[in-house]
Amino acid sequence: MKLFKILLGLAAVGLIGGVLFVYFGVFNVAADEPHSKPAYWLMETVRERSIAVHAKGIKVPSLDDASMLMSGGADYNEMCSGCHLRPGVESSELRDALYPQPPNLTKTKRANPAETFWIIKHGVKMSAMPAWGATHDDRRMWAMVAFLQQLPRLTPAQYQILTARAEGDERSHDHGSEGGDSKETMPGMNMP
């Protein structure tokens, strides 16, 4: 019984300490003030584990359809390149002002396409990553995943071709839309 009272007392002190920590604004939420190494590690670990757990069981469709690549490329260019960049671009005003800074997706890709899809669909809290599932259907988001699988291999010229929307097509989100076969348009590019 004595041990229980001690544990209860420690829990109460911890709870009061947490409330005071929040109330007095000890944690600085300013985007221009980096996190401490332990806080950054904790947030990275929480994010990565959450994504891995929530993406489990998502069935990945075939991502090698050239029309998906074209559709996803145009969406990436319009919605993502300001933060995640495009080939030949090393920074942007928006990206430079964000903390934590978004990953440069022209240099690296997430190995698991299901996790990439989950991130695009649901976003990431407190990171400026929007939840595109609120405004986009799954087929459109899978097209972005297909494009992201190729992005690190693209030259600036290839990127320009793959991200162009068909003339007069404001949305061009139909995977059967014009735009041609990127395998023919992109000589030397290895499609999956």
Image: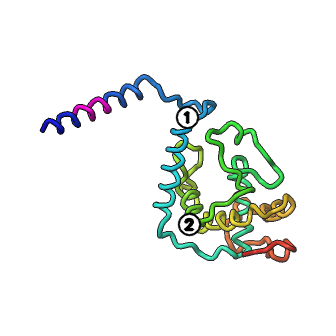
The residue lying at 76 percent from left, 74 percent from top is 191
Q: Who is closer to the viewer here, 73 or 36? A: 36
Residue 61 to residue 1: above or below = below
Majority SS type along the magenta span: helix
Residue 170 appears in which quarter of the rendering?
Answer: bottom right
Residue 32 in view, yes or no: yes
Precedes in sequence: disc 1 or disc 2: 1
Residue 150 quadrant = bottom right
The span shown in magenta is: 9-15
**Residue nearest the observer in this picture, 136 or 150:** 150
CA distance for labels 1 and 2: 30 Å
Which residue is tagged 2?
A: 114
Does residue 121 lie above or below 82 as drawn?
below
**Residue 10 point in image, percent of width and height:** 27, 33
Q: Amino acid at mark 2?
A: Ala
Q: In the figure, 75 relative to 103: above or below? A: below
Q: Which quadrant holds residue 173?
A: bottom right
Q: Is residue 171 left or right of residue 59?
A: right
Residue 61 locus on image (x, y percent): 59, 75
Instruction: Single out the residue that lies furthest toward the left.
Output: 1
Residue type, numbered disc 1: Ser
Looking at the rendered structure, the secondary structure element under dot 1 is: loop
Q: Tell me the element at label 2.
A: helix
Asked whether residue 165 appears in the rendered view, the answer is: no
Location of mark 1 (residue): 36
Residue shown at 41% from the left, 29% from the top: 22
Q: Which residue in the rendered view is the most extreme toward the front?
A: 3
Q: Residue furthest top?
A: 24
Quarter of the picture holding the N terminus: top left
Where is residue 75? Give x, y as percent: 70, 59
Q: Which image quarter holds the C terminus?
A: bottom right
